[in-house]
Image (tube, grey):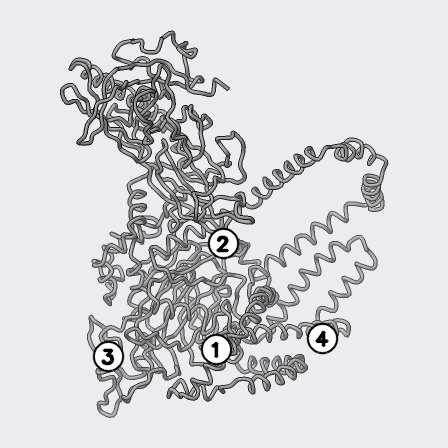
């Protein structure tokens, strides 16, 4: 329609001569035309095209300030005669990309895509055509006597021309007119910007250039250009000039761009250009041999970009040149950029974002003042003394007897390190010591023990103790780095502990063993001192040989006990830890995954998964024994069974309630079976105690003594083991035969592997290489089977943990929901008397509604019409159904897509900030095969002291969570806090020093002041 095009309001022209800026200058006849255009929707009055009664070339004076209105465009045309010389190919045009007014308005010259603007020379009438056509804001003029040097900027090109006027007065008049017009445009633009941005700017000072922070988030449901897929990327242009281009996402119809693929950029806009153009976002399909095809475009005006204020915008892609919708959507975020936003983007582009080395300080084990040349033992007056190591930098060397060391290890820690990002509560962990560690150091000297250190991993945080040199039973004393405060975000997340032997240089640390500590059974106001056996893996049967033990002291503090119940209902988000050091990555990964990663192909893992599936056949024997006990009245639940049978027989209408009640009965029966275990460490709380915790928002402290009921637990374990052996007799026979075949197939025995590892046996090495070759040949067959079996095993483990009440909060909710629904359904059934009437009418509605003669009406008004349609009409209807289906798919797909966007975005930022080596933390659905249980010497006692005051952190690390949901979702909320820490090396060095407690505040006052200095607010305020 004509009223969609910007129309000419008035024109001002000057005849002159022009030449290039080169040394060889040749004057040519030229004309300068300045043209005011306006959107018809904003116009007042009449003209050449229906606006104002002015003819082309007429003058209304040298001042257009009162004529120019908000949203107008003033174009500067440098014209040449149509018959003047040969055709020049280097035509500088920008009006092809101009859009006036709202984002729905397209350029006067048409739109052909970001990279496909029409570069032909348009005829301007009266025998003239455009040599240069740009907005007047893109023109810079400099007067030199009768000549005027003009510079034009458009499309990333700067072109220079020299204009010659007939008189000095005409040149000055031209320069003054352009200057006044540009000032008037800027004045109107600043006024509009003040109104549009709702800013609190009340003075009349000139506005500075506006900086936009723009994030290209993702595209969904794109058109497949390359058979079944596309290689999309996004080009952003403003006024025909490319301002940004993302990287290509190969073979993806739902691409997500991150900081690694250039999703973020800063766009600076001058106030006078505020209404000149819309920002064009075009999704293109990459092709190696040509520019590729357009998948769709969308427009955003600067006004809308400011008003969205960082909110996520989903733009429907369109083919703007054809005026119809394209397939797919493009998600964008825009907002006015702050100084920190600009800094963040600049650091990303320069790849100088906060260095992850500062985080390595928390992960890299510290040796301190100790080495193998130090004297570790001495004897005085018949008493043996050991050097307390690492050496306390404040007290110096301390020689202590073994009993003194043991007693000192259980004293309160001198300082704490706080890590993590959660707000559910706090987990305080102290590493007391280890016992009977394997000898992992090999050398020519007499000291061939282990240099032990411990790594603790919880959610997005990793922390490491100091190293205790040359000791198989190390004790981590209060002055060492051994105490950590983890901020909780999910009760489902376990604590991972790994023990290593320290090796200097590039050699990887030797793993000694690991444990997993689930937190669900811990209660506040209780100090748990647990000793647990270390294993190399919690997955593989052959690796279940104890490698010593570790002792931890754990306290759990919560803001609200009831919050745990609701937290258990939340999905556990994907969590990962990024490290920039392969050595740190290796020992942190071992703490989380163990010696073998079940997500990676390994023949041992494959056999273990198959073995675990075969073990679940024992459930049939357990069910058989349970039914036998119920029927023969050997169980306390036989009376409940009788009640169910009576109700089902005498009152069959209550059958739905009985089905729901059977779920609650089953869960309570399983809980009763688990509570028969004598060990207090393997005994879940009763349902009534959990219910009281939920109602009262309090949990009673626990008191467990050393070796409590250890004899009973041993007898119970023996009986249970015999029962399981009886259930698994057939499977064990099969597995023994398989093991015999495996032993013959295994070219190198366990003894040979151990000997080869210790002495470097060449024969063993050759056999191992041959064996590895065989496994590589089997990999294409076995790896898909392993990857298919793994999720099935994980689901079975999850169901197992719920049935055993190891996931006791989820088990509680299942039981409570079943009880509630049983009561509600029972009451409803009781008050509904005439069930025969309800059933009769239900049958009538279903049968008469689907099989009645009314179906003939449906046939007449729908199916018959469809059969009578032509093929083109059917095809159009099919396309419309597909479009509606895609719309429904987009709505259902949006939630999962946004979660994936947040995760990928956070991972990309963490990769840049902390390092490329990623450890994915196991989620709720990936528990270990073998659950670790504290040994009998473990104990727990109520704590009356305020844990927060007792364990005041002397250094704080916020964890690697980026808080992507904050700060309008564009720049991570915690970025500056991490950057502040990374840019304070003196502070990091200070926090590494061992500090003695101060009577006033628990830590050295200067260190406390420094900690406050880097807090920066939020979770850093301590």
Frontmost of labels 2 and 4 is: 4
Tell me if mark 1 has few (under 14), some (14-19) or many (20+) residues whose alpha carbon lies within 10 angstroms of its own.
some
Q: Is residue 193 above or below residue 427?
A: above
Lower sequence index among marks 2 and 1: 2
Q: Separation of disc 3 and disc 1 at Cα? A: 33 Å
- Which residue, given by chain and number where applicable, does mark 1 sit on? 935
Other residues around mark 3 within 10 Å, as few (<14) / some (14–19) / many (≥20): some
Q: CA distance from mark 2 to mark 1?
A: 30 Å
Q: Residue 741 appears at what percent x and percent y?
A: 59, 85
Disc 2 versus disc 3: distance between alpha carbons? 48 Å
Q: CA distance from mark 2 to mark 4?
A: 39 Å
Which label belongs to residue 563? 2
Q: Give the residue pinned by disc 4.
A: 625
Q: Nearer the viewer, residue 187 or 227?
A: 227
Find disc 3 in the rendering and name its residue.
Answer: 371
Which residue does the image show at 49% across and 68% down from the upper left? 600
Mark found first going from the N terminus, 4 or 3: 3
Give the left or right position of residue 733, taking residue 186 as reference. right
Q: Nearer the viewer, residue 710 or 50?
A: 50
Determine the secondary structure under disc 4: helix
């Amino acid at each position: 329609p004509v009223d969609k095009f910007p129309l000419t309001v008035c024109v001002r022209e000057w005849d002159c001569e022009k030449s290039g800026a080169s040394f060889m200058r040749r004057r040519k006849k030229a004309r300068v035309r300045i043209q005011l255009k306006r959107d018809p929707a904003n116009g007042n009055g009449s003209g050449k095209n229906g606006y104002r009664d002015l003819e082309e070339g007429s003058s209304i004076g040298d001042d257009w300030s009162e004529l120019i209105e908000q949203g107008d465009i003033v174009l500067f045309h440098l014209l040449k005669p149509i018959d003047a010389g040969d055709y020049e190919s280097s035509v500088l045009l920008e009006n092809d990309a101009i859009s006036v007014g709202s984002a729905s308005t397209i350029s006067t010259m048409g739109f052909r895509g970001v990279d496909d603007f029409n570069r032909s020379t348009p005829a301007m009438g009266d025998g003239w055509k455009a040599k240069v056509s740009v907005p007047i804001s893109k023109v810079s003029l400099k007067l030199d006597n009768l000549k005027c040097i003009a510079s034009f900027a458009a499309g990333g090109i700067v072109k220079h021309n020299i204009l010659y006027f007939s008189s000095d007065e005409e040149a000055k008049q031209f320069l003054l007119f352009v200057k006044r017009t540009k000032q008037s445009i800027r004045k109107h633009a600043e006024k509009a910007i003040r109104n549009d941005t709702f800013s609190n700017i009340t003075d009349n000072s000139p506005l500075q250039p506006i900086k936009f922070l723009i994030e290209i988030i993702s595209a969904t449901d794109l058109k497949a250009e390359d058979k079944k897929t596309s290689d999309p990327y996004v080009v952003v242009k403003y006024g025909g000039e490319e301002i940004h281009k993302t990287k290509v996402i190969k073979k993806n119809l739902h691409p997500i761009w991150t900081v690694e693929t250039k999703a973020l950029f800063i766009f600076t806009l001058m106030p006078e250009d505020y209404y000149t153009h819309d920002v064009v976002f075009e999704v293109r399909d990459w092709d190696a041999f040509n520019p590729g095809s357009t998948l769709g475009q969308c427009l955003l005006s600067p006004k809308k970009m400011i008003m969205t204020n960082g909110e996520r915008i989903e733009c429907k892609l369109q083919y703007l040149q054809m005026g119809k919708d394209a397939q797919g959507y493009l998600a964008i975020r825009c907002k006015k950029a702050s100084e920190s936003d600009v800094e963040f983007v600049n650091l990303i582009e320069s790849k100088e974002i906060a260095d992850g080395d500062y985080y390595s300080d928390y992960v890299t084990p510290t040796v301190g003042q100790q080495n193998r040349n130090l004297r570790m033992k001495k004897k005085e007056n018949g008493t043996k003394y050991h050097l307390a190591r690492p050496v306390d930098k404040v007290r110096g060397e301390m020689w202590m007897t073994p009993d003194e060391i043991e007693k000192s290890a259980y004293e309160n820690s001198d300082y704490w390190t706080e890590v993590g990002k959660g707000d559910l509560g706090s987990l305080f962990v102290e590493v007391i010591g280890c016992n009977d560690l394997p000898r992992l150091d090999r050398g020519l000297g007499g000291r061939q023990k282990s240099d032990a250190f411990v790594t603790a991993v919880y959610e997005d945080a990793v922390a490491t103790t100091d190293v205790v040199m040359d000791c198989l039973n190390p004790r981590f004393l209060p002055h060492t780095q051994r105490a950590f405060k983890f901020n909780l975000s999910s009760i489902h997340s376990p604590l991972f502990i790994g023990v290593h032997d320290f090796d200097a240089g590039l050699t990887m640390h030797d793993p000694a063993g690991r444990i997993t500590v689930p937190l669900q059974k811990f209660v506040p106001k209780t100090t748990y001192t647990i000793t647990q056996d270390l294993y190399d893996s919690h997955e593989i049967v052959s690796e279940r040989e104890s490698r010593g033990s570790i002792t931890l002291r754990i306290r759990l503090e919560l803001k609200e006990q009831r919050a745990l119940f609701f937290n258990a209902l939340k999905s556990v988000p994907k969590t990962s830890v990024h490290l920039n050091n392969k050595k740190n990555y290796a020992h942190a990964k071992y703490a989380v995954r163990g010696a073998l990663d079940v997500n990676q192909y390994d023949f041992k893992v494959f056999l273990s998964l198959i073995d675990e599936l075969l073990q679940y056949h024992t459930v049939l024997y357990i069910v058989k024994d349970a039914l036998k006990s119920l029927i023969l009245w050997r169980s306390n639940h036989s009376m409940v069974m009788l009640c169910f049978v009576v109700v089902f027989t005498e009152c069959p209408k209550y059958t739905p309630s009985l089905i729901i009640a059977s779920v609650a009965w089953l869960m309570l029966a399983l809980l009763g079976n688990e509570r028969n275990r004598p060990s207090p460490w393997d005994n879940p709380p009763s349902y009534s105690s959990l219910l009281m915790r939920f109602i009262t928002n309090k949990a009673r402290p626990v008191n467990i003594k050393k070796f409590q009921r250890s004899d009973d637990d041993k007898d119970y374990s023996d009986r249970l083991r015999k029962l399981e052996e009886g259930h698994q007799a057939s499977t064990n026979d099969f597995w023994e035969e398989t093991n015999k075949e495996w032993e013959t197939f295994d070219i190198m025995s366990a003894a040979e592997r151990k000997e080869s590892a210790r002495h470097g046996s060449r024969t063993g090495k050759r056999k191992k290489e041959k064996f590895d070759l065989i496994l590589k040949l089997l990999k294409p067959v076995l790896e898909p089977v392993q990857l298919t079996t793994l999720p099935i095993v994980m689901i079975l483990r999850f169901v197992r943990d719920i049935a055993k009440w190891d996931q006791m909060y989820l088990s509680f909710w299942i039981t409570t929901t079943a009880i509630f629904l049983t009561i509600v359904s029972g009451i409803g059934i009781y008050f509904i008397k005439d069930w025969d009437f309800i059933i009769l009418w239900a049958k009538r509605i279903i049968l008469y509604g689907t099989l009645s003669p009314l179906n003939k009406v449906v046939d007449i008004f729908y199916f018959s019409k469809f059969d009578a349609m032509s093929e083109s009409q059917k095809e159009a209807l099919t396309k419309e159904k597909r479009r509606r289906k895609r719309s429904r798919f987009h709505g259902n797909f949006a939630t999962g897509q946004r979660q994936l966007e947040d995760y990928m975005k956070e991972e990309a930022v963490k990769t840049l900030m902390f390092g490329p080596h990623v450890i994915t933390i196991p989620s709720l659905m990936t528990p270990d095969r073998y659950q670790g249980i504290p040994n009998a010497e473990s104990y727990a006692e109520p704590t009356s002291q305020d844990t927060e005051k007792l364990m005041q952190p002397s250094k704080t690390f916020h964890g690697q969570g980026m808080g992507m949901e904050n700060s309008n979702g564009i720049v991570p909320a915690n970025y500056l806090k991490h950057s502040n820490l990374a840019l304070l090396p003196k502070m990091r060095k200070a926090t590494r020093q061992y500090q003695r407690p101060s009577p006033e505040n628990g830590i050295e006052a200067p260190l406390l002041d420094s900690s406050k200095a880097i807090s920066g607010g939020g979770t850093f305020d301590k």
